[in-house]
């Protein structure tokens, strides 16, 4: 299986030179996520990076904008302790009690240990993971667990480019409206 870096280059998300420069920068800084660094530095578009991650993890992705606009019920947050969410860069989004299913966004959604631990912590047998940038998840944790209404401000300025034309719908992008339907309105 190809490495994430190889996949990003093969899919045209970044060039080998950019990947090398960002990797060197992360090493000088003492670490960090390559995907987040590519997006924040402006070398790669958020959706393109997330698309590669979603394909690798066999899931769908959530952008910063969609995560910022999410509505999460307090009882869903109560299912996953904040320390677990912070430690795993994961955020519960919705619980479907009839099927014991938890919808969660995570920086490493394919990690089997994470999923097993989450099942135990949340007390639910089915986990439906989505992927997002770690920085977006950290901002969401600050917003939803700690009530920080400004958590997304700097991040959005850094990585969400001004819209000129509406983005094309990507089939790997999760439509949160399916998961967060408003009573009386059809799911999108």
Image: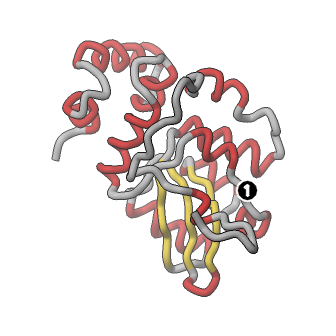
Image vertical order of residue 166 relative to residue 54, above or below: above
Task: Point out residue 114 in the picture as x, y percentages from the top left corner.
Answer: 47, 60
Task: Point out residue 121 in the picture as x, y percentages from the top left corner.
Answer: 60, 70
Residue designated by label 1: 71
Q: Who's the residue at 61% across and 60% down the image? A: 177
Task: Point out residue 13 in the picture as x, y percentages from the top left corner.
Answer: 31, 28
Image vertical order of residue 116 relative to residue 123, above or below: above
Count neighbours of disc 1 (C-alpha within 10 A) and say few if under 14, some if 14 to 19, many if 20 or more.
Answer: some
Left or right? Give the position of 69 relative to 21: right
- Which image quadrant for residue 19? top left
- 62 and 116: which one is in front? 62
Left or right? Give the position of 143 relative to 60: right
Q: Who's the residue at 65% across and 22% down the image? A: 157
Give the structural element (helix, strand or loop) at label 1: loop
The colour mode here is secondary structure
| Residue found farthest to the bottom | 98
Left or right? Give the position of 160 relative to 140: left
Left or right? Give the position of 13 relative to 3: right
Q: Who's the residue at 79% across and 64% down the image? A: 74
> How many numbered marks, from 0 up?
1
- 45 and 91: which one is in front? 45
- 178 and 186: which one is in front? 186
| Residue found farthest to the front | 165
Image vertical order of residue 156 relative to residue 69, above or below: above
Q: Who's the residue at 63% across and 46% down the image? A: 67
Which image quadrant: the C terminus?
Answer: bottom right
Task: Point out residue 2 in the picture as x, y percentages from the top left corner.
Answer: 18, 41
Image vertical order of residue 72 relative to residue 23, above or below: below
């Amino acid at each position: 299986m190809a490495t994430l870096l190889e996949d990003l280059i093969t899919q045209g998300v970044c060039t080998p030179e950019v990947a090398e420069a960002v990797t060197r920068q992360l090493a000088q800084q003492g670490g960090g996520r390559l995907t987040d660094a590519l997006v924040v530095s402006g070398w790669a578009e958020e959706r393109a990076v997330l698309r590669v991650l979603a394909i690798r993890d066999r899931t769908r992705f959530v952008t910063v904008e969609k995560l910022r606009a999410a509505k999460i019920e307090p009882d869903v947050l109560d299912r996953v302790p904040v320390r677990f969410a912070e430690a795993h860069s994961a955020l519960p989004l919705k619980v479907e009690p009839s099927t014991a299913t938890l919808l969660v966004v995570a920086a490493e959604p394919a990690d089997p240990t994470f999923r097993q631990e989450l099942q135990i912590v949340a007390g639910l047998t089915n986990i439906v993971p989505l992927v997002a940038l770690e920085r977006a998840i950290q901002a969401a944790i600050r917003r939803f667990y700690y009530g920080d209404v400004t958590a997304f401000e700097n991040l959005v300025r850094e990585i969400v480019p001004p819209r000129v034309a509406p983005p094309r719908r990507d089939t790997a992008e999760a439509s949160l409206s399916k998961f967060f339907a408003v009573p009386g309105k059809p799911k999108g």
